[in-house]
Amino acid sequence: MIYELCRIQASALTFKSVAKRALHAQGPGLLLGVWQSEIGALFQIVLLRSWPNEAAQREAHEQRLLVADGMGIRPGESISYECFSKFPFLPEVTSPPQGKVFELRTYYLRPGGLTPTLKGWEKALKPAQEYTSHLVINMYASDGLDRIIHLWSFDSLEQRAELRAKYYALNLWPPEGGPEQIVYASNTILMPIG
């Protein structure tokens, strides 16, 4: 399965109308979630979709390129698409994830950093299961700069902070060998739309 992260950047004045359009966005692929940014890059709407294979995703992307208004994007708004494959040892995401607060983390990796990152994550998942059970998906980019993106789901920011603190204190998180691969990182807290 191939995953696509779509980010729509609105303005303070257009955010509500853009969010409404995104929530009702139709199109190819399986829509797995629509969120709005709450902490981090503001006035952003994030959509996660999946396709059965790269050919289906590529065809959908080419069709979008030929549509004059994209997802109803207007002057002062922008849209970007990124393609990913999930970490091979994680399950596919087949339905919208549940949760009240979502965290979207992006790690830009040094060249060659994906292999040790994958090894570290695979080894760390089970020992930190109480924490990692909140992982919706972890993906690596198939385009652009070397990077991974992971999406987490929590009941609250407090739950997130408590679990992170607990597993850091136990030296079970972050995954061994992972932080050494990170050149740059960003984080956005998202809330579900709808």
Image (cartoon, rainbow, N blue to C red):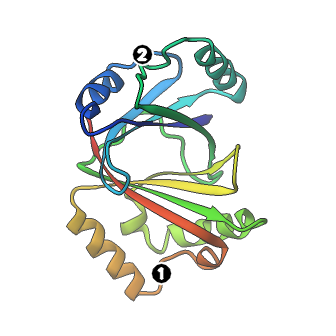
* Tag 1 residue: 172
* Tag 2 residue: 26
Q: Amino acid at mark 2?
A: Gln
Q: Residues within 10 Å of mark 2 (few under 14, many from 20)?
A: few
Q: Position of residue 59 (x, y in %)?
A: 68, 18
Q: Is residue 3 above or below residue 42?
A: above
Q: Quadrant of residue 60?
A: top right
Q: Position of residue 11 (x, y in %)?
A: 32, 37
Q: Is residue 163 above or below residue 142?
A: below
Q: Position of residue 125 (x, y in %)?
A: 51, 67
Residue 194 seen in the figure: no
In the visual, does 114 lie left or right of 3?
right
Could you say which is closer to the camera, residue 75 or residue 32? 75
Q: Position of residue 101 (x, y in %)?
A: 27, 52
Q: Quadrant of residue 130?
A: bottom left
In the visual, does 100 lie left or right of 112?
left
Residue 51 seen in the figure: yes
Q: Amino acid at mark 1?
A: Leu
Give the position of the C terminus as an image quadrant: top left
Q: Is residue 191 above or below residue 130?
A: above
User: Label 1's element?
Assistant: loop
Query: Who's the residue at 62% across and 18% down the image?
Result: 65
Query: Who's the residue at 48% across and 74% down the image?
Result: 127
Q: How many numbered circles does the render carry?
A: 2
Q: Residues within 10 Å of mark 1 (few under 14, many from 20)?
A: some
Query: Who's the residue at 71% across and 62% down the image?
Result: 114
Q: Distance from label 2 to label 1 (Cα)? A: 41 Å
Give the position of the N terminus as an image quadrant: top right
